[in-house]
Image: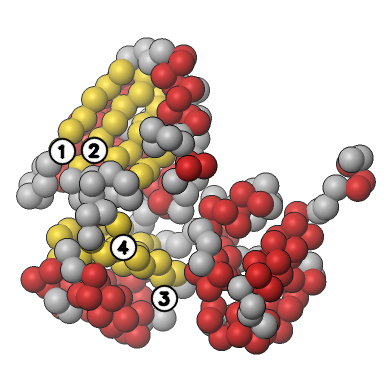
């Protein structure tokens, strides 16, 4: 197929959304209702008139169609980027619950309390429930306080970042970077919130790059962040990250590999899961 014959990015996402919607037997009106997006906007996205839908709209549509944001993003070859500055939120907060019922109750209260730009909620291993919100600082802080007030006995861990580092934001949203650096560092924690907290501290204070953040799924509830950089920078990042969270009642594991073997780096770049992301 010649370059001119290839579908353009807007055609690809419009066709994908339309095909998934029809496969599920949904009308545009029903998809609009499920996603909370005006039907006129759905129509403009499917027609290709909106070439680059916002991350918020992609997230809502993905949820309504019961697919992941990564699946939709992958189909449009990063033309709508998770890392686009206009799609980042000044502040984020995450509350981790031991009870699914408590998490759903708190998430509902949080989104009702303040005008949030972003909401992502769902289950992770082992039977925990995460509520992640994003938006302006004041709204996120108000929503976060409400979440802490609801079912406090079920809260496992929590974090609020009023000035979240762009790399942390993008990694949480699914961005992954291949390791092109001398050293590899790992911070692994028994909770998601503390891992995000440590990653933010580490990348703000040391000259490292976040390669990936994994948030508990298929990890027995654990979470980890991979860092790349010069050996001394990675060592500093790990130390700073652990210092941020060492007072929490959690398990922490770390490592720094000064010169990771190319084959191992390649395996990590393909997928951090044993059977890879395509079989997840």
Q: Nearer the viewer, mark 3 or mark 2?
A: 2
Distance CA(mark 4)–CA(mark 2): 19 Å
Instruction: Give whichever of discs 1 and 3 has the lower sequence position.
Output: 3
Comparing 114 with 8, the one in front is: 8
Kindly state the secondary structure of the residue where label 1 is placed: strand
Residue at screen point 20% across, 42% down: 189
Cβ atoms at labels 1 and 2 below 8 Å apart: yes
| Horizontal and vertical percent position of residue 157 | 17, 58
Q: Which residue is mark 1?
A: 252
Instruction: Give whichever of discs 4 and 2 has the lower sequence position.
Output: 4
Q: Which residue is mark 3?
A: 116
Residue at screen point 39% across, 47% down: 168
Kindly state the secondary structure of the residue where label 2 is placed: strand
In the picture shown, does residue 108 fall above or below 91? below
Kindly state the secondary structure of the residue where label 3 is placed: loop
Instruction: Give whichever of discs 3 and 4 has the lower sequence position.
Output: 3
Q: Which residue is mark 2?
A: 188
In the picture shown, does residue 137 fall above or below 7? below
Cβ atoms at labels 1 and 3 below 8 Å apart: no
State the mark number for residue 123: 4
């Amino acid at each position: 197929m010649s370059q001119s014959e290839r579908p353009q990015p807007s055609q690809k996402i419009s066709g994908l959304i339309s095909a998934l919607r029809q496969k599920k037997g949904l009308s545009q009106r029903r998809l609009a209702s499920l996603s909370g997006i005006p039907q006129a906007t759905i129509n403009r996205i499917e027609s290709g008139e909106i070439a680059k839908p916002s991350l918020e709209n992609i997230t809502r549509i993905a949820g309504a169609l019961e697919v992941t944001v990564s699946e939709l993003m992958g189909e449009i070859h990063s033309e709508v980027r998770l890392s686009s500055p206009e799609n980042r939120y000044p502040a984020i907060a995450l509350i981790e619950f031991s009870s699914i019922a408590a998490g759903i109750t708190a998430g509902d209260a949080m989104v009702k309390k303040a005008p949030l730009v972003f909401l992502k909620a769902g289950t992770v291993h082992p039977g925990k429930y995460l509520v992640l919100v994003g938006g302006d600082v004041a709204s996120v802080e108000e929503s976060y306080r409400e979440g802490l007030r609801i079912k406090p006995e079920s809260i496992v861990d929590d974090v609020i970042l009023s000035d979240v580092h762009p790399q942390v934001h993008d990694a949480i949203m699914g961005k992954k970077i291949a390791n092109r650096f001398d050293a590899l560092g790992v911070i692994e924690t028994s909770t998601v919130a503390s891992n995000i907290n440590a990653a933010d501290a580490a990348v703000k204070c040391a000259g490292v790059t976040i390669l990936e953040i994994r948030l508990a799924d298929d990890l027995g509830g654990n979470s980890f962040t991979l860092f790349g950089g010069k050996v001394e920078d990675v060592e500093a990042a790990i130390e700073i990250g652990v210092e941020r969270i060492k007072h929490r009642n959690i398990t922490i594991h770390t490592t720094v590999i000064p010169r990771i073997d190319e084959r191992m780096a390649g395996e990590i770049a393909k997928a951090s899961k044993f059977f890879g992301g395509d079989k997840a």
